[in-house]
Image: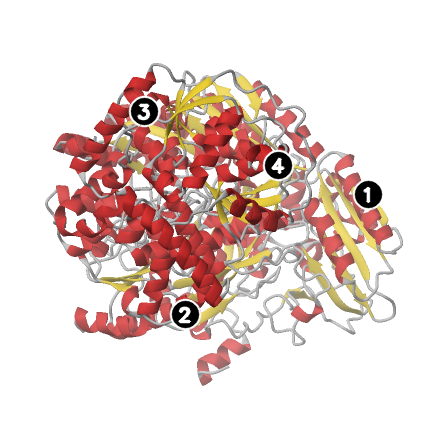
Amino acid sequence: MSTPDLIRDLRRAAGRSSVLDDAAACSVYARDASHLEHGRPACVVLPETVECLRQVVELCACHGRPFVVRGGGTGLSGGALPVDGAVVIGTSRLLRLGPVDVERSRVHAEPGVINDAVTRHALPHGLHFAPDPSSQSAATVGGNVAENAGGPHCLKVGVTAQHVRRLDWIDARGRAWTTGRGAAFERGVDLRGLLCGSEGTLGVVTGAELLLQPVPEATVTLLAVFPSLADATRAVVDLMTSGLVPEACEIVDRVMLGAVEAAFGFGFPTDVDAVMICEMAGSVGAAGEDAARAEAVLRAAGARDVNAAADEDERSRLWMCRKKAFGAVGRLAPAYISMDVVVPLGSLTTLVEDIQTIKTEHRVEVATAFHAGDGNLHPGVHYDDRDQDLTARAHRAADAIVMRALELKGSCTGEHGVGLEKRHLIHHQLDATSLQLMRGVKTVFDPHGLCNPDKLLPASDVTAASPVPVPDRPDFRWKSLTVTAPAATPLAVLQAEALTRGLWIPVGAASRIRAAGPGLGGSVTVGDLVDAGTVGPSLLGSTSVGDALLELWAETGDGRIFHAGAPVLKNVAGYDLVRLISGSGGILARPLAATWQLKPAPGCVACWTWSDVPPTLSGESRRDFLRVLRRHGQPAAAVRERASAGPVLWVLAAGRDRAWDLDRLGDDLTAWSEDHGLRRPSMQRQSGSDLANPSSLAGLPGWACGSPDWTLLTRREGHPDWPRPRRLIWQNRPDLLWTPEVIPEEPVGWFADTVFADGRLQSLPRPPAGVPVELLVGLKRLFDPDDRLPVPEWLAAAREGGTW
Amino acid sequence: MSGSLDRTQLDDLRQSCVECGLCLPNCATYLATGNEAQSPRGRLLLLGEVLDGRTDASEPSVRETFDQCLGCLACTATCPSGVSADLLAYVRRLAADADPNRRPPVRLLDRRAVLRTLRVVGSLVRGAAVRLLGAGWRGRLERTPGAGRRLARLLGTLPVDPGSDDALIAQFETLDGGGPRPAVSSHHRAPAAGLRVAVFKGCADASLMPHTSRRLQDLLRRLGCELTVPEGQDCCGALASHLESRGRTSRLRRRNRRAFTPHLGHCDHVVVAAAGCGQELKSQPGDLSDMVIDAVSLLERLAPVDLGPVPLRVAVHDPCHARHGLGVVEAPRRLLARIPGVVVLEPAEAEVCCGSAGVYGVQHPEMSAVMGRRKAEALAATGCDAVVTTNPGCLGQIADGLALVAPHIPILPLTDLVWYAARASGPRKEMS
């Protein structure tokens, strides 16, 4: 249909003033922060309500017109640039930000809300939104979700996908869905995880329930000065493997320092090769002690000078300089290619050195400011775009850097996305099968190719990367903090080995309780964990196994072997097949091997037990209890309801190798008990190394139960080995504690089900009503066309009857 | 100056924009419309297209985009890559040149007699409106259709005059409870030893808020300044400059230079009350600009430590001229911190323009009304008892917004609050 018809229909739906087809708007919306140009839109629509946005998408579908959604236009990979004649849908008028749900640490935001505004909104409640891309003062929540944005402070708590608990979205046909129940544990085909980082090619994000993090009691920001960039990168590896977990760990090189200093006059030394900004946070004592330890590590690694920011003002100025660094590149040259390659931490120094070689080879200038702690580099090749030869060399140099990162088993993009910018590179990273599956996923979601076309996936005639062989034995890469293991490897074996180095896979201890209850006990394997997608309370603050799972080899139902992800801590290259498969109950693919992230293991673990808590806690005591948990970094808590007596309450905490951290939590919990007329809790504590030997955790009922198989919310009344629990409510976040109203009576949710029973993984539960089953049917057909993998009843029914 | 930018300079300036988009949330026109063409980055992209000959500045949508720029400088203040304000001035000039017809109706606005009349009309209209329709008069008129609404906006933006001393005192006493004040007359800090200050009255200040202007002079004298008010001074030229009226701007500048030059040799500062005038004078080359100091910064240096208590929660609105132009952000807060009982509240979007911007409110009444309302909402959301600011333009614009969204919150000149506090610190009769 013709453009005037389309515009007439859009005006009718969205209102005259919301549809712009003038020359100015069409020119401006053809560009974004990426310096790329692709096509010119037919018009720009700025809907004022989500319903209006839905109608716009529906109209585009009716007219067969491609569309692309745009947030703040700060994307660096050209992900929001339209093709010729497309409709650009701007979210700048969708700005509603819901009230902060303090107890559940949540807030709902419409897609146009600026990242920074979420934190400003939550700060009065002592909470903040962790993802903080450098563009956070202008980037929007919708864009953050679409690109799976990161930022310096994602080092400890993960990128956007880990902070989105529920997603409102519109599919390519204009139907609105809500995916995810917002619960602590969800199991099933993780559409939410797939949509995060899909760059708007699968659907349109119209709202997100965001998880907020407590603002730490104390933060110490160190500024370390290094005579050489290589020393600085080596220091990062030393720091990250020292058992410390910084909130952020950034490096700024000499060229970038010069630009930043010219722009903001912070007072950085400009005669050094690199400075590192490293932030430690926690309780007052912990932050100070960790900072002192970090300082010692950095000095030993060659730091010339290490200073802590004097006050909050200095700290915020320091971060402002870091975050606006790339804008300051404008002072060096009119254009730059801001890259975001990621490599395993252990290869960081190699890549940094190779970039210097590439720079000399191609005669270009590179300024770098990067998230060193997760191996995510931002080399910015800057150039004068009026010089054609220089422009060509700059682009060749950028491509060479990406290829080098891929040789080092890295990823071409950790934050900015593939978009337009890396479409010509992505096939070097993906093997033929995963590329084929990604194309299939796109077809399932958007059969007519209207949803942000020409992005993320390469052109059809490319040669994919050669397959990565499936590993046949466990391989620990200590410097990179990862372990790769075949699916059949027992988790307990990996954990025991990792614990010898003070590390572990943060999914909980292997359990001793195979015989005692529903569970797989010590026989939980890597593959089981991938299929189940659940974690123990010990993975504090995480959503699912997908958060710690970096790389996956799997086999589809019809025997195609594919490799997804990369052994790096951040990766947004292509669709997140790792999250899609993990937790899908084995219905889509059979895991063959996986790479996990290793984190410092707890130095000690403790459990506080109250056996006389009332069936429900009053508002105030509950609020105070949750406040104590927030103050202490959200330890897990659980309530077990019993038929014969009152409920039992447990708080399970992992501490570092210092007793006083947990003592403070204990003091606060005791004070809370006394304030609210409860008996003081009993407390057991054990060394973290006991996690290697689950049977030694007998004294810690909570921890012993805290293995993957116990993360279920069980309603297994009448199980012979089980002391008749009516309900066991885990909460890694304060989601479910004493909120029975959110637990459905029927065990149908993605969270309230039995994952393992009698040593076997239970069939995948029926997804809740907000999930488009036809998409799940489509995915099942894509991955397992001949039904050789399990077919849950609900899926079969949906396929046959068209309803379920 | 922007007028003399040649093609090479323009190209260089344009290249300084790296299109990062960090300016968007600071731009009042972008916030009001959600349209990126109405953002600083959008304007510079379009300027590029105009310079490359890909589009024309007289194309209506492009001209409108350029024309809607407030010139508030909020974008350049946040720009990490140092895009120059000259570039946006150039953009506005392009719009003006593309449509020479738009100036005449508002040209008279920088004439003192016109402003004086508007002030009188403003006071009368507001008084009558409040008597007839109550405190919520503005909101009630706003709900009337079409012409009524436009009329309400017109009346609402008429200049605000805080009025005589008695009226001001009465207003403050309603706000802070007006209880008896402890007499703290005993020790004033020794007045600044004979600081000689020439006063730039500014037409907006002198014609729109004569009492406030006089009170500031009282205050300065009391703090030990020796004041001179040079004869023959005129409007600073900011309004004429906003109107892109180049001839008149330079005439006014010449006139002011003539008036002040004889005094510059024997005075320490030239004090300016309105932030808009301050920035205009500062931006001109020559001796005068070096001596210019804004009233708040001067008061902050001079004010006695024992200002009387005023128990009041005030939200501070920084005029763009002060915040982005002169970089005066800390001084008003430090000054207010000296007044016991005053709690300073910071609104959201503090760096965003209120939409007054010289004659912008008259040229773009609808857009300006949206901005004024948004600003008033942000200020009211702080939970303040009153708003203070230092520019007569902002005063009128925000007063209109507040009349709509929070009629109980008055907006007052910051110097009047200091005057009231100084009065409260001494015997009542000394000041009034």
Q: Tag 2, which chain?
A: B
Q: Earlier in the sequence, mark 1 or mark 3?
A: 3
Horizontal side, residue A75 vs residue A156: left or right = left
Q: Which mark is residue A433?
A: none
Q: Residue at x 46, y 70 (%)?
A: A177
Compared with residue A369, is residue B32 higher up or lower down, i.e. above or below?
below
Question: Secondary structure under badge 2?
Answer: loop
Q: Tag 4, which chain?
A: B
Horizontal and vertical percent position of residue A585: 55, 65
Q: Residues within 10 Å of mark 2 (few under 14, many from 20)?
A: few
Compared with residue A607, is residue A245 higher up or lower down, i.e. above or below?
above
Q: Which mark is residue B143?
A: 2
Horizontal and vertical percent position of residue A745: 67, 76
Q: Amino acid at mark 3?
A: Thr
Work out which residue is located at the far bottom of the displayed protein and give it: A801
Quadrant of the frame with the C terminus of chain B: top right
Closest to the observer, A134 or A709: A134
Q: Residue at x 22, y 69 (%)?
A: A7
Q: Nearer the viewer, mark 4 or mark 1?
A: 4
Q: Specify whether disc 2 shares its chain with disc 3.
A: no
Q: Amino acid at mark 1?
A: Asp
Horizontal side, residue A6 vs residue B328: left or right = left
Q: Residue at x 21, y 27 (%)?
A: B254
Horizontal and vertical percent position of residue A214: 62, 47
Q: Determine which residue is flagged by label 4.
A: B428
- CA distance for labels 1 and 3: 56 Å
Q: Specify whether disc 4 shares its chain with disc 1.
A: no
Q: Earlier in the sequence, mark 4 or mark 2?
A: 2
